[in-house]
Image (cartoon, helix red, strand yellow):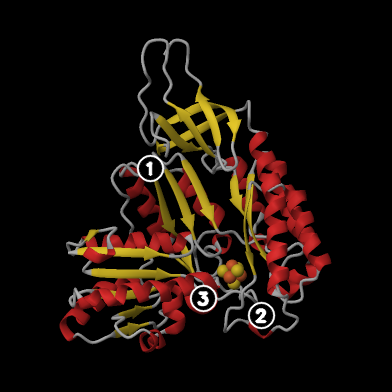
């Protein structure tokens, strides 16, 4: 039996797809990249933006006709779009067998068995007190050095533009003991780098009685032998506590890189978005972080053309980009998400204006990103090797603690060629900056 999984959207979805692969591996399913040879097709969706939703309908338009040649093929749609649409998705797309919600991931194998027996379409989108699937472990693939660990799910912030609290449910933190156990197992399996995941990891544990804070959880993960690097995402600026900021100084394995979504630089827009901070308080957090970790690499999310955003508001977003000096930004035109508060906002920005602002925003950031990368030339960085580079020819690729990509040739020491494998750590001198990556040369000891 073969399973084909298509994943849209964020890292949480990538992590969930890993869990689905694992759940079906124990039932004898092998992953395949060829949808035409699959016995089960799972589409794991995202509805944070409009595009992945459109992508889903086009994918179903391709996959459902495959059932004519393979009547035993089962097609399932999960994730945020499934949660939002429920059985309406099956009404719109006849031939879709299963719709499973964001709390029902662990029930998917039972749903597939039931559909195979009954030949009837099923849907399961109830929210549960504890989201199903959170305790399912995504086993790392052979030779993997990095793994994602979900520590919490859902969100209570209800930003006015965001569909997440409506489709992922209210904030729920996993027990710290279960998280630590999972990271220990990953370390024993050879994982060196963990990414702790959640919609708002900064508020981990705050609403679970007797649970520890996120900073304390990081400390426990830090103690696990074999884990060399710790990352986390996503952080809400308003919940970035002093305790968490100081963890960057006390926990050397905690990488100096942080995704801190800013969304907009204008206080008026931030207020309408319901973000709970101002541009000044955001900058204050950035300054605090840079006081303790001067070289911390920051990335962010930006929405342009939010209802009511004037040119002057937009200029403030550009000014924030310059003040912070992000490594990278993930920027989007605002698109209405039905069911959110902002869907009722008037004062809509024209699409042509949104496109123009997005182009200006990305144009400015390209220059800033380039300057950040150029400033690395001449420095020596610690690079964790992820595998051969795309160029091949004995070229390797890895990331610095700041998450910058570095490609480098296999070094030759005074005595012999140095053997390289994923998971190795090298000191690499940066010799060149490209648009999205760096090039380096391994610093080889004269005596090695
Ligand atoms: S913090 Fe806001 S933007 Fe982030 S998931 Fe929660 S509601 Fe959505």
1 vs 3, front mark: 1
- Dot 3 corresponds to which residue? 170
Decide if ligand 1 comes within 8 Å of the CB at mark 1: no
Q: Residue at x 72, y 51 (%)?
A: 364
10 Å crowding of disc 1: few (<14), some (14-19), many (20+): many
- Dot 2 corresponds to which residue? 342
Q: Residue at x 63, y 75 (%)?
A: 161
Q: Residue at x 55, y 38 (%)?
A: 252
Q: Earlier in the sequence, mark 2 or mark 3?
A: 3
Decide if ligand 1 comes within 8 Å of the CB at mark 2: no
Find residue 429 and report its horizontal and vertical position in percent.
Answer: 56, 25
Q: Is residue 107 left or right of residue 69?
A: right
10 Å crowding of disc 2: few (<14), some (14-19), many (20+): many
* Viewer-side residue, 177 vs 417: 417
- In the rendered image of this protein, does residue 295 appear above or below residue 82? above
Q: Quadrant of residue 56?
A: bottom left
**In this rendering, does residue 237 appear at all?**
yes
Q: Secondary structure at mark 2?
A: helix
Q: Quadrant of residue 17?
A: bottom left
CA distance for labels 1 and 3 = 32 Å
10 Å crowding of disc 3: few (<14), some (14-19), many (20+): some
Mark number displayed over residue 145? 1
Find residue 427 and report its horizontal and vertical position in percent.
Answer: 51, 26
């Amino acid at each position: 039996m073969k399973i084909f999984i298509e994943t849209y959207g964020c890292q949480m979805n990538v992590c969930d797809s890993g869990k689905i692969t694992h759940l079906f591996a124990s039932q004898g399913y092998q992953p395949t990249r060829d949808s035409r040879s699959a016995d089960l097709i799972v589409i794991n969706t995202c509805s944070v933006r409009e595009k992945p939703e459109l992508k889903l309908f086009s994918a179903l338009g391709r996959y459902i006709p495959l059932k004519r040649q393979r009547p035993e093929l089962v097609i399932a749609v999960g994730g945020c779009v499934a949660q939002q649409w429920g059985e309406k998705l099956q009404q719109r797309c006849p031939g879709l067998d299963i719709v499973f919600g964001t709390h029902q991931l662990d029930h998917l194998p039972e749903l597939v068995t039931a559909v195979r027996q009954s030949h009837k379409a099923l849907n399961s989108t109830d929210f549960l007190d504890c989201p199903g699937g959170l305790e399912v472990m995504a086993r790392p693939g052979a030779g993997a050095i990095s793994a994602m660990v979900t520590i919490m799910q859902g969100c209570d912030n209800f930003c006015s533009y965001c569909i997440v609290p409506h489709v992922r449910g209210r904030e729920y933190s996993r027990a710290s003991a279960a998280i630590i156990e999972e990271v220990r197992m990953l370390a024993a399996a050879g994982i060196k780098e963990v990414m702790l995941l959640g919609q708002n990891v900064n508020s981990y544990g705050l609403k679970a009685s007797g649970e520890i804070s996120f900073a304390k959880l990081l400390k426990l993960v830090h103690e696990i032998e074999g884990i060399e690097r710790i990352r986390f995402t996503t952080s809400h600026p308003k919940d970035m506590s002093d305790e968490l900021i100081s963890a960057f100084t006390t926990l050397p394995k905690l990488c100096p890189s942080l995704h801190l979504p800013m969304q907009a630089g204008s206080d008026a827009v931030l207020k309408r978005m319901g973000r709970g901070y101002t541009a000044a308080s955001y900058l204050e957090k950035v300054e605090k972080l840079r006081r303790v970790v001067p070289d911390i690499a920051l990335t962010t999310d930006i929405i342009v053309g939010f209802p009511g955003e004037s040119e002057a508001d937009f200029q403030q977003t550009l000014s924030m980009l310059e003040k912070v000096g992000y490594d990278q930004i993930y920027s989007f035109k605002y698109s209405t998400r039905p069911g959110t508060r902002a869907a009722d906002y008037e004062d809509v920005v024209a699409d042509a204006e949104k496109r123009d602002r997005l182009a200006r925003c990305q144009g400015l950031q390209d220059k800033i990103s380039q300057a950040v990368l150029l400033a690395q030339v001449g420095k020596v960085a610690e690079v964790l090797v992820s595998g051969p580079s795309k160029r091949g020819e004995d070229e390797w690729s890895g990331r610095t603690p700041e998450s910058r990509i570095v490609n480098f040739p296999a070094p030759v020491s005074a005595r012999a060629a140095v053997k390289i494998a994923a998971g190795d750590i090298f000191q690499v001198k940066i010799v060149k900056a490209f648009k999205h990556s760096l090039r380096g040369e391994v610093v080889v000891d004269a005596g090695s």
